[in-house]
Image (tube, rainbow, N blue to C red):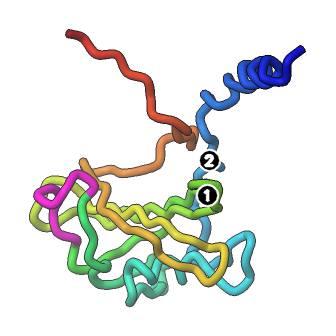
Amino acid sequence: MKPSLLRFILALTLLPFFWTPAGAQAVSFPELGSTLPSRTDVTYLDLARMVIPDLTADKDGLYRGGLPIEMRHIKGPNSGGSPPETSGFSNAAVLAIKASGKDRLTMLFDLGDSPDSAEGYAVLALYDITAKPALLDAVNVALDRGTYFREPGKLPSAPAMTSSSP
């Protein structure tokens, strides 16, 4: 059998594996003061402070701080409202993902209501935690009052096929 024909048959055999969605791990809600599973020198609170620099724990177990860093809205420059002047929450949703073959971590912070919009204000932050932790991106993703990760945590690995009508 010709080598090119063998490669073609192998490609056809492996093709269905490329159509499956890329799985993410389950969403978790770790204590912000706890360390990341793969690290002993970095806490989730350290990562959260890259978004809300003055974030601290209070006696009731809530985390409070001022304004988050400046960021864009997911829908564009004329969308979304302002962040609340004070941020407060008890935890953040955490989802480990793989992007372009690299391990990344996302955290979703629901900061509550926007003072000038009917929408809430929710920050989705993307971190590189492989070396010295770095905030790669942060964006306001609130489109309504409640923002959360859907289950199961799966993302398409290729553009979705859509049909269009004439």
The residue stretch that appears in magenta: 74-83
Quarter of the picture holding the C terminus: top left
Residue at point 48% right, 42% down?
150
Q: Which residue is mark 1?
A: 96
Q: Residues within 10 Å of mark 2 (few under 14, many from 20)?
A: some
* Dot 2: element: loop
Q: Amino acid at mark 1?
A: Ala
Label of residue 109 in the image = none
Camera-side residue: 90 or 45?
Answer: 45
**In the image, is residue 118 part of the stretch drawn in magenta?**
no
Whether pointer 1 and pointer 2 mark residues with C-beta atoms closer than 8 Å, the reply is yes
- On the picture, is 59 further left or further right than 5? left
Q: Position of residue 118 (x, y in %)?
A: 14, 54
Camera-side residue: 149 or 159?
Answer: 159
Q: Amino acid at mark 2?
A: Ala
**In the image, is residue 77 part of the stretch drawn in magenta?**
yes
Q: Position of residue 94 (x, y in %)?
A: 55, 60
Q: Quadrant of residue 46?
A: bottom right
Magenta stretch, main secondary structure, is: loop
Label of residue 24 in the image = 2
- On the picture, is 68 further left or further right than 89? left
